[in-house]
Amino acid sequence: MQRKSHMSTKNSALNESEISRIIEMAWEDRTPFSAIKDGFGLSEPQVIKLMRKEMHKSSFKLWRERVSERKTKHLALRSDEIIRAYCPTQYKNR
């Protein structure tokens, strides 16, 4: 998950830390795009543009394939059984 540049001109309102967090959230299987929208104000198409700009082409392609198969990334397709945005073991104390 390497990034091409440290900041893009289109997303200049976002700092490096915010861009990094958006990329991390976009990779997480259980974090829906609506959570990114709520936290950072970016719609799904804007997240896709950010990912395309900030990632290497091969990493972006892997991410798009992964996201396309994940119903958990879209709340409308998500099962009602999923009640949290992340795996319970994801944020262990380090």
Image (cartoon, rainbow, N blue to C red):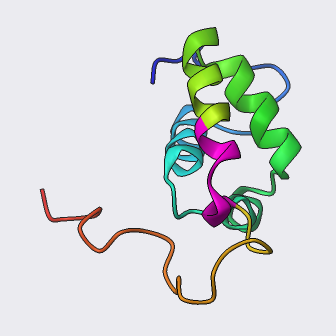
Q: Is 27 included in the stretch rendered in magenta?
A: no
Percent of width and height locating residue 86: 43, 68
Front residue of 26 and 11: 26
Percent of width and height locating residue 17: 51, 39
Residue range in magenta is 66-73
> In the rendered view of the protein, which quadrant contains the N terminus?
top left
Q: Is residue 38 above or below residue 23?
A: below
* Number of marks in picture: 0
Q: Is residue 62 above or below residue 66?
A: above
The percent position of residue 4, horizontal first and vertical second, equals: 58, 10
Q: Residue at x 57, y 12 (%)?
A: 58
Q: Quadrant of the C terminus?
A: bottom left
Q: Residue 26, how many percent across, how many down? A: 59, 46
Q: Is residue 59 above or below residue 20?
A: above
The residue at 49%/52% (across/down) is: 28
Q: Is residue 12 visible?
A: no
Q: Residue furthest front?
A: 69
Quarter of the image for residue 40 reads bottom right
In the image, residue 44 above or below residue 59:
below
Left of 59 or right of it: where is 69?
right
| Residue displayed at 68% across by 29% down | 51
Dominant SS in magenta: helix
Camera-side residue of 26 and 71 = 71
